[in-house]
Image: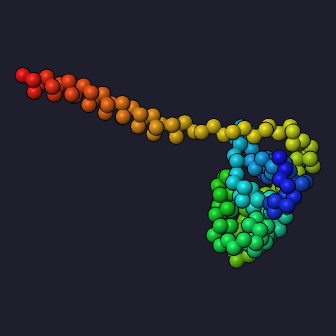
Amino acid sequence: MNQPPDSGRPRVPELEAFRLGVWMVHQAEGTLCYGERSLRLEPRVMDVLICLAAEPGKVVGKEALLEAVWGGAYVEEGALSQAVHSLRKALEDDARQPRYIQTIPKRGYRLIAPVVSAVASGVAAESVPAPARVPQPRWRVWPWLALAVLSLTAVLAVWFGRGTLATVSGR
């Protein structure tokens, strides 16, 4: 599932699968895995992570990230900030007390968590569980279920209400 070389997407072959702190990152699949959890990142968010992981501990400038991820297209800095925000949210990181991504004001970002290639750590990419589709949380089903029950109740009220109304007016 590798992308063609001319796709313009950042690719770091030695980081095809790597550990980032407690997370296992699968570059080609665009996923972060930790235990039973598997999160699919948006492509641009994964690209930002790959650019930072290619230079762990070093400040990667905002312009360099914009060029690498958006390929020279005119994009406001807010798009980069949003991608970093999404990445922090996925990693459960905090900008005020970072464990993964540190903001360097006016300059860029630095990945401060250890990055270890799956090959270097002795963990073959194949031995890491394949990312499964993340099941939708059950709490998202409840609003639809409640709406269905309310709709059914309304239909039944109208149906049985008509019979009562006809009986009362038919006297």
Compared to residue 132, the image places residue 41 above or below, namely: below
Query: Is 54 positioned to the left or the right of 70 in the image?
Result: right
Residue 76, horizontal then vertical, whole percent: 65, 73
What colour scheme has been applied to the protein in the rendered image? rainbow
The answer, for residue 68, to whether it is visible in the render is yes
Q: Identify the residue at the far bottom of this view.
A: 106
Residue at 78% x, 47% y: name it.
Answer: 29
The answer to which quarter of the image holds residue 9 is bottom right
The answer to which quarter of the image holds residue 59 is bottom right
Compared to residue 99, the image places residue 105 above or below, namely: below
Q: Count numbered badges in the picture.
A: 0
Query: Is 4 positioned to the left or the right of 140 in the image?
Result: right
Query: Is 133 positioned to the left or the right of 162 in the image?
Result: right
Residue at 92% x, 43% y: name it.
Answer: 122
Q: Quadrant of the C terminus?
A: top left
Residue at 52% x, 40% y: name it.
Answer: 140
Residue 23, horizontal then vertical, whole percent: 76, 48
Residue closest to the eye, 63 or 34 = 63
Residue at 70% x, 47% y: name it.
Answer: 40
Compared to residue 63, the image places residue 10 above or below, namely: above
The answer to which quarter of the image holds residue 147 is top left
Compared to residue 60, the image places residue 165 above or below, namely: above
Residue closest to the eye, 164 or 64 = 164
Residue 158, horizontal then vertical, whole percent: 26, 31
The answer, for residue 111, to whether it is visible in the render is no
